[in-house]
Image: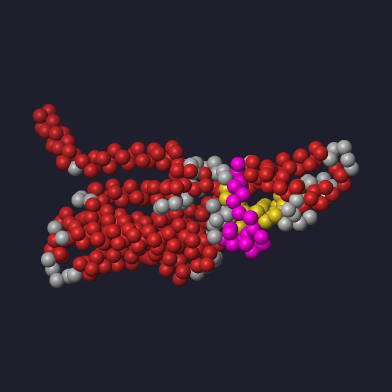
Amino acid sequence: MGSRLLGMIIKEFLHLIRDPMAVVLALFLPVFMLFIFGYAVNTDVKHISTVVLDQSVSTDSQKLLEAFNNSQYFNLRYRAQSPAELTRLIDEGKAKVGIVIPPDYSKRQSRQSAQIQVIVDASDPLVATSAINAATSLGLQRSLQVFTRSLTGTALLQRDDEPPVDFRVRAWYNPDLISAIFIVPGLIGALLLQSTIAVMAVTVVREREKGTLEALIVSPVRRWELMLGKIIPNLLVAYGQMTMALLVAHYVFEMPIRGSLTLLYALSLVFMWGTLGIGIYVSTVARTVAQAMQMSMLTLLPSIYLSGLLFPIEGMPRAAQYLAAIIPLTYYLRIVRGILLKGVGLSSLWPNVLPLIAFGAIIFTLAVLRFRKSLD
């Protein structure tokens, strides 16, 4: 019995040695997961991209903005010249917070309550919660400072218990901060990613393992017909999954659909252009189904955890944010949430569409060239 067991163990080790890529991938994946969760994932969001509409342009307003910037929760990246420009920057996702200072801020602060409008993009509840809490705390601090400076005067008695600096926080797109409304659109992107990368790669590799791919090569079927024959069914399945997910999200989770579904389906094709290219490329590198699945996981894991699907990119270290900038799902999630939650059109989404077009053109071309070479 002992010799038979030892023989089985030796046999399995020999199989592992003959497939070193599978061993490397199996050892690398846990380390990669630890890196993502230990280093990149952070729910304490700081340095939130902020746009400012300072209609006062006074010393007091500058001191207020310095207090926002010094809090480390707000990064005053943009200066708007009009409410329309402020709205556009928030719609495009370039800014998550908007600060509006009224023209009579200095006068109202010294005589009565000065109201500051803080607009928060609540499509991401984690970012919105951090921004709302930080703004509320900052408002209380500023009010306390003004109270302290006016203790010797009469201004304190004339405010009728109103705070001298009143921060009016407005949450846009998801005012109740419901997590499902944020996560469900992201899951649509995850479904398309999984269908077009893992399924595509496994389908081609399985054909190679069974020997049917060689039979197709020597058949009258042309190579571009072979490739399209693999791609089109996966596209149809992905669109079917997307449609079912939208129906469930809307009617079960009450997720709003404020934008154009036609635009969403069209831009989804641009996204899947690149992810199908990844799937085809993986299928040319992997020699077994197990390798194809492991390689697919290497693309799926960083996409899911670093793209902003579950955790805000603003809370990640700088290196992880650079990595998120080259992940296609990062831009597609902004498109999905922009259309479904914000109701914006192509004019606001094009900064996210261009990277998807560039990525798709590059990776799909490389994948097709390698696929043809592997058939040769």
Residue at 57% from the left image edge and 61% from the top image edge: 91
Q: Quadrant of residue 207?
A: bottom left
Between 86 and 127, the one nearer to me in the picture = 86
Image colouring: secondary structure
Q: Is residue 18 left or right of residue 356?
A: left
Is 172 inside the magenta-drawn segment?
Answer: no
Location of the N terminus by quadrant is top left
What residue is at 73 percent from the left and 49 percent from the top? Answer: 61
Residue 122 percent coordinates (x, y): 58, 54
Q: In the image, is residue 349 above or below residue 23?
A: below
Q: Residue 84 appears in which quarter of the rendering? A: bottom right
Q: Nearer the viewer, residue 243 or 24?
A: 24
Q: Position of residue 166 (x, y in %)?
A: 74, 49
- The range drawn in magenta is 72-91
- The residue located at (34%, 39%) in the rendering is 30
Q: Quadrant of the C terminus?
A: bottom left
In this rendering, is residue 205 above or below 151? below
Q: Residue 218 placed where, x, y %? A: 12, 66
For the question of whether residue 171 can be seen, the reply is: no
State whether residue 76 appears in this view: yes
The residue depicted at 50 percent of the width and 67 percent of the height is: 346
Q: Is residue 287 left or right of residue 189?
A: left
Q: In x, y percent, where is residue 87?
A: 62, 61
